[in-house]
Amino acid sequence: MTQYQIRQLADQIQPPESGKQSIVLTDDKNTKVVLFAFPAGDGLKEHVAPLPAIIQIIKGEAELTVGEEPVTGKPGTWIRMDAKTPHSIKAQSQLVILLTLLK
């Protein structure tokens, strides 16, 4: 079994024409890491994750809400949320994000 991974995240996935695309990069006893891609104008309506989560913007720009706080996301934006924190995301341009769920 491989003990490490090396990936260029911005090159791993391309936003689809509509909807979302995702790739599970790892899912073990401690973390689940998923790379998501959205076209401009698409995203996820407000929802909650059952686990603590981290969102990192890899490519593109987005308008997010975390709890009740609006956040402008761009490459390098890093957001950590407790479990069950309401959040949403809307891509302003083609968007790639990395979601890490902490188990």
Image (tube, rainbow, N blue to C red):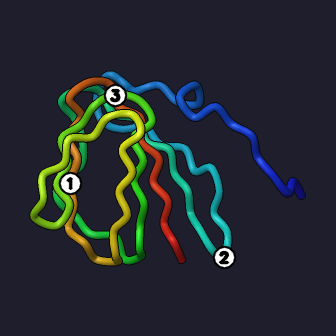
The residues tagged by marks 2 and 3 sit, at their Cα atoms, a distance apart of 30 Å
- Is residue 6 found left or right of 3 in the rendered image? left
Based on the displayed image, in which of its 4 quarters is residue 63 positioned?
Answer: top left
Judged from the image, the secondary structure of the residue bearing numbered disc 1 is strand
Pointer 3 local density, CA inside 10 Å: few below 14, some 14–19, many at least 20 = many
Q: Is residue 87 above or below residue 11?
A: below
Residue at the extreme right: 1
Q: Which mark is residue 60?
A: 3
Residue in front for this viewpoint, 74 or 2: 74
5 or 39, which lies in front? 5
Q: In the rendered structure, find residue 88 and report the number of the disc placed on it.
A: 1
* Secondary-structure class at tag 2: loop
x 10%, y 64%: residue:
68
| Mark earlier in primary sequence (2, 1) | 2
Does 54 appear above or below 38?
below
Residue 41 place in picture, x, y as percent: 18, 30
Residue at screen point 64% across, 31% down: 8
Q: Position of residue 50 (x, y in %)?
A: 37, 77
Q: Nearer the viewer, mark 3 or mark 1?
A: 3
Give, as a three-letter code, the residue at label 3: Gly
- The crowding category of the residue bearing disc 1, from other C-alpha atoms within 10 Å (few below 14, some 14 to 19, many at least 20), is some
Looking at the rendered structure, the kind of residue marked 2 is Lys
Depth order, front residue of 83/44: 83
Q: Earlier in the sequence, mark 3 or mark 1?
A: 3
Task: Left or right? Give the position of 43 relative to 23.
Answer: left
Figure quadrant of residue 43? top left
Q: Which residue is mark 2?
A: 29
Q: Position of residue 92 (x, y in %)?
A: 20, 29
Quadrant (top left/top right/bottom left/bottom right) for the C terminus: bottom right
